[in-house]
Image (spheres, rainbow, N blue to C red):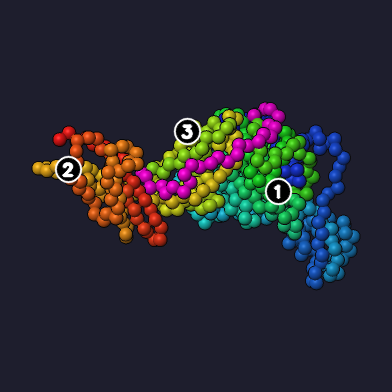
Amino acid sequence: MRGARAVRATAAPFFAFALALFVLPRGAEARESAPAQPPEMTTYVTRPGDSLYDIATRYLRNPADWKKVASLNHVSEPRHLQPGTTLRVPVALLRQDGLSAKVVAANGPVQHAFRGGPLLPLTVGSSLVEGDRVQTGHNGFATLELADGSHFALPPDTSLDLATLRQTALTGATDRVVDLHHGEVSSEVTHATKKDDRFQIRSPSVVAGVRGTQFRVSYDGDKGATAVEVLDGAVGVDADSPARNRHGASARPPAPGTPLAASEQLVAAHHGSLTLAGQPAGAPVTLLDAPDLLHPSKVQDDEEVAFEIAPSAGASAWRVQIGRDAGLLDMIRDQRSADPRVSFANLDDGTYFVRISAIDARGLEGMPASYAFERRRVALGTSAGPIEGSRDFAFRWFIHRNAQNTRFRFVLGTTSDLRVPLIDRTDITAGEAVVRDLPKGVYYWTVIAEQFDNGHYYQKASPVQSFRLDW
């Protein structure tokens, strides 16, 4: 998706990105040389009627591990536990339950499949689970929502797997891992409430992990670069991770309680990092500021919806996205352009939101700016010509979208800017104006439709046209 921001899908070294408070292992060699860490523990306070067998059945992966809990806590009567007793339980023994992701928006060609199953259309309201694969077509969009309110949006030409969606019993810590094969994921992650909560987006050479932030990850195997752009919060960067095996396949997620090493560097808000395959993680650079949209309050009434962006220093291209909601979770258009004027066809009437951003020479996308706009297509047709057998000249027009209290203004002058009009008639209700006894010369004219509809005022002007009289 991102042009020059991709990484080859090979067995290249696997760079890791993680927040300083949520970081990734530094490699097998580091783990072998580091002193052994004591297993992480959590606690359970017994209630009336509890037995160690019941506790093991409710919370442990293997109920037979009640023996390990009994030995650790010196429990001699596993069937009869004193209420209020605090038991220490190794986190690594706890069961992990499956979570789901809800589809809150899907537009255009979007499909999903469970593991190696057939691809099926993705529908709003459906739930996806660990092992589901999602891919968007050339004009496809999808947004998934997790139980904690986190969202991740998939623009066109994106493919990913929900590699891990789990919650650890007793502690409630969540583990969410998304494998990005190509394209982009734009994420807004709810701040973690537990220290072991994990949210990762992985490409074949990069892992982006956070504990509460808004960021984008894009990967394109043809270009050999992966980009991480942080809009809010921070993402840690590490250049060594065992998260995948040497063939590039997903490895088993770390067990609950696995110690996490320190990050090499931190990509803060308003910064991005571009990493090339086989090289150290890219150093953070400042993202371009959000560009300004010219004429943001303009009603989009032409055949095509068009946006003009104010050129800004450092911008080599622009990205324009359109959605039905302010957060652009329900996105319907996405376009990149080297021209600061970007247009879209075939957009129905309604209220929409547009998000614009500038792209620098590295291919890093900058900070976004969002605006609301109204799409109200109005076609105003015009014609003009002499009335046979007279020196009268008739001007006619029609508007395809009538509304109550529609009025027309007719302006005629001898200069194209119509600053000093010969005729300026307002409050015309018919679709015609006749001008008599015009002398020889070149004339310019336009008609303006004015409408009041549902408490709003709308205005549509025809192009300024010209004609010559030689009589």
Residue type at mark 2: give it: Asp
Secondary structure of the residue carrying numbered label 1: loop
- Residue 283, how many percent across, how many down? 70, 32
Residue 264 placement, left or right of 464 = right
Q: Which residues are magenta?
A: 276-303
Q: Earlier in the sequence, mark 2 or mark 3?
A: 3
Label 3 or label 1, whichever lies nearer to me, is 3
Residue type at mark 1: give it: Arg
Callout 1: 10 Å neighbours few (<14), some, many (20+)?
A: many
**Residue that label 3 marks:** 339
Closer-to-camera residue (401/9) = 401
Q: Main secondary structure of the magenta part?
A: loop
Location of residue 272 (image quadrant):
top right
Q: Residue at x 73, y 39 (%)?
A: 266
Disc 2 + disc 3, Cβ < 8 Å: no
Location of residue 312 (image quadrant):
top right
**Residue that label 1 marks:** 211
**Residue that label 2 marks:** 437
Q: Residue at x 30, y 50 (%)?
A: 409
Residue 414 can be seen in this image: yes
- Residue 149, how many percent across, how many down? 62, 55
Q: Earlier in the sequence, mark 2 or mark 1?
A: 1
Label 2 and label 1: CA atoms lie apart by 77 Å
Extreme bottom residue here? 48
